[in-house]
Image (tube, rainbow, N blue to C red):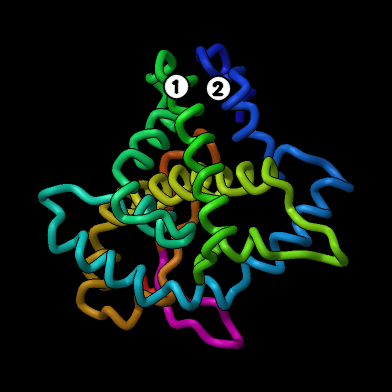
Amino acid sequence: MAEQLGPRSGALSPAFRALDAHMLNSDPPDHTRLGRLVGKAFTSGVVARLRPRVEAVADELLDAMAAGGALPMTVICELLGVPEEDRQSFRECVLVITAQDAAGQLATASTGLLGYLGELIERKRAEPGDDLLSKLVRVSDDGDRLSAAELVAMASLLVIAGQDTTVDLIGNGVLSLLREPVLLGKLRAAPELLPGARCTWAPTGSRRSRWSAGWRSRRASSSPCR
């Protein structure tokens, strides 16, 4: 991540470097080892159990859209087991780190997030819950475990990647669909087509992305409904 931030002040601070020392910035055999350990905890079952809560949060945010909402951040907090009373300050640190115009606050936010994640991990170690972070604390492979620094970096990866990618995906996906009024009308008229809807992202420099919708089946992925 630091390479992508360019000259931003704070990108080379010890706290930021600690948060950035995750598996995406590692090579085999380190990447292989981290992936094996995390894969034991971050399973499809963990995600599936979170689905009802994600749907409930999405409904709540849609009902209160005028007041603003943060679905990705709320889901990340649920996934990591961040207590409700800590979520506002947690969100503020993450938004500073992922912003492109907050260079002066980056080192402070990185230090704050690093400290908080370290404290949260120790809480999960003492009183584990059913959240992913508790599972990562306990996971082992032939006696190998994630170190405290690796746990912090992995939590940071889940937070930063989950926030940025999901926000961009939802925003760009909605914008792309709004640019396809005919297809949007068909999806509104036939909501059963939604599970098969696909957004094909255009290459850099192309005019825009394209949507299609159809039925999912085992024999074919989808059939355009245009």
Q: Nearer the viewer, residue 30 or 27?
A: 30
Q: Position of residue 5 (x, y in %)?
A: 55, 22
Span shown in magenta:
212-222
Instruction: Report, in whole angstroms, how far the alpha carbon at label 1 lies from the one at label 2.
Output: 16 Å
- Of all residues, the one furthest to the front in this rendering is 126
**Residue in the image at 29% along x and 43% along y:** 88
Quadrant location of the C terminus?
bottom left
The tag earlier along the polypeptide, 1 or 2, is: 2
Q: Amino acid at mark 2?
A: Leu
Could you tell me if residue 179 is visible in this image? no
Q: Amino acid at mark 1?
A: Thr
Residue that label 2 marks: 5
Q: Position of residue 93 (x, y in %)?
A: 40, 33
Q: Nearer the viewer, residue 145 or 33?
A: 145
**Residue in the image at 29% along x and 65% along y:** 183
Quadrant location of the N terminus?
top right
Residue 108, numbered label: 1
